[in-house]
Amino acid sequence: MNKTFTVLLALCLITFNLKAQDDLLSKHVPELKKIFKSESATFRGFNFGDTKTAIKAAEDAAIEGEGKDFVVYKVKIDENEYAEIMYTFDEQDKVKMFGVAFIENVNLSAEERILDDFQAYFTQRHGKFAVNNKNDEVWTSADGYVIEMGDSSDGKSDLLEIEIEIFKK
């Protein structure tokens, strides 16, 4: 009886925790939801070590480009915005890094809203960030991977480019 109760309690807590994670993503801007898609794994439903074949079979975004050790997808946010999603692979064709380049037309209020929301999302999931020597914001997950986010815009055009890299130490 006690073992049954313990198992049921554990299942309820796991279900509650998974629901809370999904709820976290649902509280953020549409751009973030479209880019991250799911919190069921490290990024977009995938984890480090997943194979190139598995990602190509399951990723629902349009392929933008492909090379020996990477695949780039394009996720349309709206008519003016898109994100490039990059998966980088090791010699065994297993994911070693996830990347995002989020491009949008510069609009100061929208830019602030999106950057603030990315920052809030990562902080809610991984705790406080540090700032590295490139002025990127850096979070370290409980699972030991690193998230770096920075603005890589050239300042010469009317486009904002936010880059995010997710990799193991």
Image: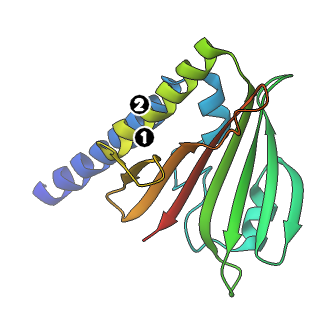
Q: Which residue is mark 1?
A: 122
- Point out the residue furthest to the left here: 2
- Residue drawn at x 66%, y 48% is 100
Instruction: Tell me which amino acid carries mark 1.
Output: Phe
Residue 37 shows up from this direction = no
> 5 or 14, which is in the foreground?
14
Which corner quadrant of the image does residue 122 belong to?
A: top left
> 5 or 110, which is in the foreground?
110
Give the mark count.
2
- Point out the residue furthest to the front here: 156
Q: Position of residue 3 (x, y in %)?
A: 16, 60
Instruction: Tell me which amino acid carries mark 2.
Output: Ala
- Tell me the quadrant of the picture where the N terminus can be found: bottom left
> 52 or 15, which is in the foreground?
52
Instruction: State the SS at label 2.
Output: helix
Kindly indicate whether the residue at mark 2 contacts the one at mark 1 (C-beta within 8 angstroms): yes
48, above or below 38, in the image: below
Q: Position of residue 144 (x, y in %)?
A: 36, 65
Mark 2 surroundings: few (<14), some (14-19) or many (≥20) residues within 10 A: some
| 79 sits to left or right of 119 | right
- Residue drawn at x 55%, y 69% is 48
Q: Position of residue 57 (x, y in %)?
A: 80, 62
Instruction: State the SS at label 1.
Output: helix
- Mark 1 → mark 2, Cα distance in angstroms: 6 Å
| 58 sits to left or right of 21 | right
Which corner quadrant of the image does residue 2 belong to?
A: bottom left
Q: Which residue is mark 2?
A: 120
